[in-house]
Structure formats: C-alpha cells, structure tokens
Amino acid sequence: MLATLLLAGGPVWAQAPTPAPSASSSNPTNGATAEAQVDQRIAEMHRRLKITPEQQSAWDAFARLMRDNVTTTDRAYKDRRTSIATMSAPENMQNFAQIEQDRAQGVQNLSAAFQTLYGTMSDDQKHTADTLFRHYADRAEARKRAPK
C-alpha cells in the first residue's frame, strides 16, 4: 500500500495486494518492520511534498491513517497466521475476505484524507504528489513482475 502500498512497499494509500510483514518481524529486504517502513515513507513524502504549516493538520490526519492501516492489517494477518491451523476451509475464506474488506475500507479512508490534503496543495505540490504516486505504482508493478 497506501496502506500496503504505503504500508509495505507500493503507494501507501493504494496498498499492494500482499500482506505486510508482521510488526514483530523484519522485512527481509532491509530489516525494517512494517511500522518503520511506513514511518520512513511518511517522512519522505512530507519532505518531498514540502508540507506547509497550514497543511500540517491535514497531513497529520493522512499520516495517522497510514500508520493505523499498517498496524491494523499487520495485526489481522498475524492473528490469521496463529489461528489458520484450526480453521475450516469456509472459515479460512471468510477470514481472508474480512481482512481484505477491512483493508479496502482503510484505503478508502486514506483516500478521503489524501483528497482533503491534496485540495490544500499548490500546483507544484500537486505535480510532485502525482509524480510520487505514479512512481510508487511503477515500483509495486515491478515487484510483482520480479522473479521470486
């Protein structure tokens, strides 16, 4: 996102379809937890978008949702891993569907918060945001195509 995109590797608000690593585990590519990764992305975006003091409250709401989405999704997948061995096939499917539905709602909330922030941006900031989001999407697509 956003959540997974921003969550784990793609645009934080457009989250990649793969679950984020658990909060207690490290990302094998760089040793960072999901929370640390999203904090890095938030800091990078704040810097590159040149958020002004007047935009800070809208930015803070957006950043808080990014963090909440990462934490919530990470916790849901961790809980799933601990209980999957005792789930029936229908319970497994329902659990996964619920996680994805909750994740999608988180992205919707994130999108609304970003729309509010975007509405306060200068044309230069909007151009930077548009470029950043395209870059994140391109990186997420490249990761999907990369041999595993």
Image (cartoon, rainbow, N blue to C red):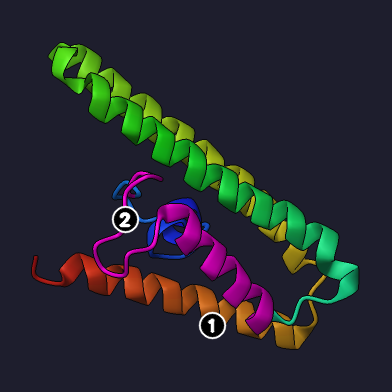
Residue 140 spot, x, y in % from top left: 33, 68
User: Is residue 105 positioned above or below 6 on the image?
Assistant: above
Residue 5 spot, x, y in % from top left: 43, 59
User: Considering the numbered disc 1 on the image, is that residue within a helix, a strand or a loop?
Assistant: helix
Q: Is residue 125 left or right of residue 32?
A: right
Q: Is residue 13 visible?
A: yes
The quarter of the picture where the C terminus appears is: bottom left
Q: Which residue is mark 2?
A: 26
User: Which residue sits at x=31%, y=21%?
Assistant: 95
Residue 57 spot, x, y in % from top left: 84, 58
User: Is residue 129 positioned above or below 14 on the image?
Assistant: below
Query: Could you tell which of marks 1 and 2 lies nearer the N-terminus?
Result: 2
Three-letter amino acid code at the position of disc 2: Ser
- Within 10 Å of disc 2 (Cα), the crowding (few <14, some 14-19, many 20+) is some
User: Is residue 128 positioned above or below 46 on the image?
Assistant: below
Q: Is residue 105 left or right of residue 30?
A: right
Asked if the stretch drawn in magenta spans residue 144, the answer is: no
User: Which residue sits at x=50%, y=42%?
Assistant: 71
Callout in the foreground (1, 2): 2
Asked if the stretch drawn in magenta spans residue 36, the answer is: yes
Residue at the bottom extreme, as displayed: 124
| Residue 8 image-quadrant placement | bottom left
The quarter of the picture where the N terminus appears is: bottom left
User: Considering the numbered disc 2 on the image, is that residue within a helix, a strand or a loop?
Assistant: loop
Q: Which residue is mark 1?
A: 131
Residue 47 spot, x, y in % from top left: 67, 81
Which residues, given as a range, are shown in magenta? 21-48
For the residues labelled 1 and 2, the Cα–Cα distance comes to 29 Å
